[in-house]
Amino acid sequence: MAEENLEEQKCPPCKQRIAAWMTSYSDLMALLVCFFVLLFALSTIDPGKFDLAASSFQQAFNGVLTSLPTVPIHQEVIRPRLGGDAQNKRIAADAASRLREVAARENLNEAIKVEVTESGIAIRISDRVSFESGSDRLMTHFSEILQEIARIANEMPDREVRVEGHTDNVPIRTVRFPSNWELSAARAVAVIRHLQQDGVDPSRLSAVGYAEFRPVASNATESGRRENRRIEVYIEYLEKR
């Protein structure tokens, strides 16, 4: 009986408890791992340097590691995909700056205006540097501007490029252009043909002619009519919802 009483008086085995600080420590380690994974995903990896580092590790651990795990390097790692409205707006601003530099180099600051819009960039080009009077034949300076526009458009191959032709209200009646509708549409088509020749995917291109019906200035004055005779190119940078 005495032995049974002694066994009943023994304390039950205590359960092992994890120190409270271990919970915070493990959370911290998990956050650090996520942080470094994020940095790695945003970094640009040089395959040559990576191979050199890998061979150095193999030599240092010769006999310890039979092989070094390989890390697949995909195009998405080397050049992360663009995403997010804020990032696309920054890209649009950079593209607009490049176009302004080209216009300044060609002394066309007054004839070419570039603006960053809510959906991308808008390029307004006066007809005095784009087309011969009453014609849809491109001028030399305009071709150089279109080459830069094509380069910028090709940097984002999944975005749309829209070209609009506009005229003043002075009537035109020729065999080829019975009215300003035909002239404005033909000029817009001439631009997208040039962009296609410079490598822009034609499935992304669209052209429209508005004739004199979307003026930006009064047609009552020569200066106003000069502003209304224009080509507008829109490159959409933000994805449609």
Image (spheres, grey):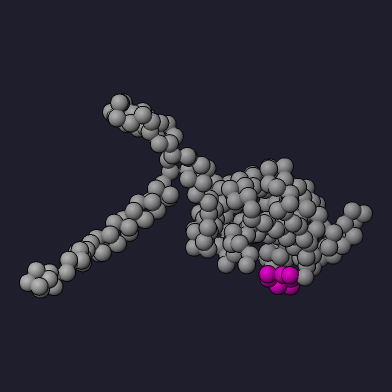
Seen from the viewer's position, the closer of residues 60 and 213 is 60
Q: Is residue 218 magenta?
A: yes
- The image shows residue 20 at horizontal and vertical percentages of 21, 67
Return the residue found at the far right: 175
Residue at image position (40%, 36%) is 69
Residue at image position (43%, 43%) is 44
Seen from the viewer's position, the closer of residues 72 and 149 is 72
Q: Quadrant of the C terminus?
A: bottom right
Q: Quadrant of the N terminus?
A: bottom left
Q: Which residues are magenta?
A: 214-221
- Tally of marks: 0
Q: Is residue 165 magenta?
A: no
Q: Horizontally, is 29 left or right of 234 in the view? A: left
Seen from the viewer's position, the closer of residues 12 and 160 is 12
Whether residue 240 is visible to the viewer of this picture, yes or no, is yes
Residue at image position (72%, 45%) is 196
Return the residue found at the far left: 2
- The image shows residue 66 at horizontal and vertical percentages of 36, 29
Q: Horizontally, is 125 left or right of 107 in the view? A: right
Q: Is residue 58 above or below residue 212?
A: above
SS majority, magenta = loop
- The image shows residue 217 at horizontal and vertical percentages of 68, 71
The quarter holding residue 198 reads: top right
- The image shows residue 100 at horizontal and vertical percentages of 54, 53
Seen from the viewer's position, the closer of residues 231 and 83 is 83
Whether residue 103 is visible to the viewer of this picture, yes or no, is no
